[in-house]
Image (cartoon, helix red, strand yellow):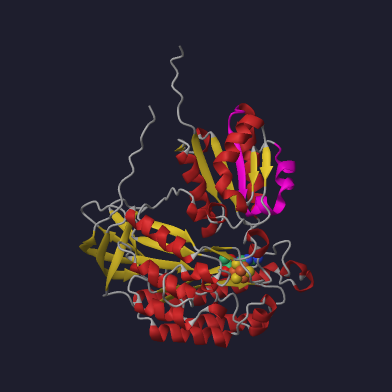
Amino acid sequence: MSETVDRPRRYLVRTFGCQMNEHDSERIAGQFEAEGMVPAHDEDDADVIVLNTCCIRENADNRLYGTLGHLKPRKDADPDLQIVVSGCLAQKDRDLVRERAPYVDVVMGTHNVHRAADLVERARREGPLTEILDAAVADDATTFPSALPPRRDQQHAAWVTIQVGCDNSCAFCIVPAVRGAEISRPFLALVDEVRRLADDGVTEVTLLGQNVNSYGRDLTLAERRAGGDGPVRPLFADLLRAAGAVDGIRRVRFTSPHPKDLRPETIAAMAEVPEVCNHLHLPLQSGSDRVLAAMHRGYTAERYLDRLRRARAEIDDLAVTTDIIVGFPGETDDDFARTLEVAAEARYDSAYTFIYSPRPGTEAATMTDVEVPADVIAERFERLRVVVERTAVERHAARVGRVEEVTVEGPSRKDPSVLTGRTSQNKLVHFASERPLRVGTYVTVAVTGAASHHLRGDLMDVVAPARHRTRIPVASA
Ligand code: 5AD
Ligand code: SF4
């Protein structure tokens, strides 16, 4: 009889890109763990390596093929190593991935997340395979990664996918092409999921969708009514209220609302439900009406600012963040000057600023005759950074002297005696603590200092202990 005991297979999921992708990665990891696999320490130690790709903002192609090239010698030396390419780029480029890297074991698309473990197992038996579903199937586990077993990196916080896909057609954006049409999860299924997460000790949920404010437009009346006898509309605001009402949930976040669909009911729910965090991420993209129209964003700068003013008037102590693209085709100096003005007027707490990058297959990618030169974009990008930083510093400085409730996220990377956490406004806070505090503990911190991207403070009290159980890895006999 052989003395060898099978060691569990080890997996590593590398995520490129957005939160939706990170969420998909967690679900892939969750399936592997349900099959008895364990996380690998690093690439060298992994039996299965998943590269979960993104093609929204960057030239993911280069990064993916670079990473694959680097993995090839290992694969040659160890045929048992399995390499999986998943996500947007796999969905979009399909056969190209296999052509360029024939040694990849599994190529799977964005609609196949629920099949990851099966596909890996099948490829092990039958050899390399590609499976790309063209569209989401309206079956819960298929369409919605949330309905799969999760493996969360932070045990006290979880993402909940409320819709997939996007029905808008922003000229720069590849999402509708790779993620398909908007599909919402039924109301009750979502509330149930939040309840289950809370039972598991989760205290913070982030509702995730490309355009959360249009959540539910595609649901049948019956699916909307599943929420109870209350109003059938507006759905997203109802969802915020229902999630906030779940026992054990202390914080509800969401991303992202589209400015054109930000309804008064959503603002009211944010204002009235204490569990809904006072943070609004409202992507501006550009401050020029001409560029906004060319992008098909469906609002003008003035309408955007007007919605923001209303949100600030109603929601106490609101933090506002945004996404802005610099160098959309045809963007003139005047257009960009408007972006600077609007950004200054919006007084953002922080902004994700992106250099425009043509995504093949989008409308903007065809506008090659009006491309903005790279040096002009770089200079604009820097000027925008300065404007955003100015208001960010001011708004952070205004927190000094306040006492904030903070969720502990763990020791600081630079100094383990310092803990980091987040406020309801989603600001990072560093504070010293003599005693160890579990991740997920809620504490109060007196803010004593501010920088453009974080706050510093002194620990005051523990408000609520972490509720989740610590996972103890169980070795199979
Ligand atoms: N180029 C640059 N930025 C982009 N984004 C989306 N597509 C592109 C692109 N082609 C940015 C938008 C969006 C965020 C998620 O990514 O600002 O809000
Ligand atoms: Fe892309 Fe626009 Fe949809 Fe956002 S709303 S995912 S930017 S198409």
Image vertical order of residue 344 relative to residue 433, above or below:
below
Q: Residue at x 35, y 79 (%)?
A: 272
In this rendering, the count of numbered labels is 0
Position of 245 compared to 34: left or right?
left
In percent of width and height, residue 470 lies at 31, 46
Span shown in magenta: 78-102
Q: Was residue 79 drawn as part of the magenta stretch in this picture?
A: yes
Instruction: Note whether 66 is above or below 201 in the view shown.
Output: above
> Residue 208 at x, y = what percent?
49, 63
* Foreground residue among 345 and 317: 317
Nearest the eye: 339 or 367: 367
Q: Position of residue 34 (x, y in %)?
A: 46, 40
Q: Nearer the viewer, residue 296 or 244?
A: 244
Whether residue 318 can be seen here: no
Q: Residue furthest right?
A: 369
Task: Left or right? Give the position of 280 relative to 79.
Answer: left
Magenta stretch encompasses residue 200 = no
